[in-house]
Image (spheres, rainbow, N blue to C red):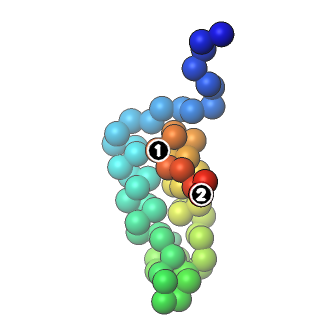
Amino acid sequence: MSTPPQGHAPISDELARRYWEAVAVHGDDPATDMCVHCRRSRCPEWAYAVEQLILADLLNFEK
Ligand SMILES: [Zn+2]
């Protein structure tokens, strides 16, 4: 059994770059604890980008 694990959908560099950008743009402002863009904590844009990066195995939230 040497099949690669399914569930990691590879995404293009361009797409990955856009997700990283979204994470940066929509990240929580440490001062307010809210997205500086949408003015809400962990806004949908941020959550979606993070989810895609995790699915693509580019981001690891486990500590
Ligand atoms: Zn936002």
Picture quadrant of residue 45: bottom right
- Pick the residue in front: 54 or 60: 60
For the point 57% across and 33% down, the residue is 8
Residue found at the far bottom of this picture: 31
- Residue 2 at x, y = what percent? 60, 12
- Do the residues under discs 2 and 1 have CB atoms within 8 angstroms? no
For the point 44% across and 53% down, the residue is 19
For the point 51% across and 76% down, the residue is 28
- Please, is residue 21 above or below residue 9 in the view? below
Q: Name the N-terminal-most of marks 2 and 1.
A: 1
Residue 50 in view (yes/no)? yes
Q: Is mark 1 within 8 Å of ligand 1?
A: no
Q: Is residue 35 left or right of residue 1?
A: left
Picture quadrant of residue 55: top right
- Residue 50 at x, y = what percent? 54, 55
Q: Is mark 2 within 8 Å of ligand 1?
A: no
Q: Which residue is mark 1?
A: 58
Q: Secondary structure at mark 2?
A: loop
Q: 10 Å neighbourhood of mark 2: few (<14), some, or many (≥20)?
A: few
- Please, is residue 4 above or below residue 16 in the view? above
- Pick the residue in front: 23 or 1: 1
Residue 39 in view (yes/no)? no
Where is the N terminus found, in terms of image quarters? top right
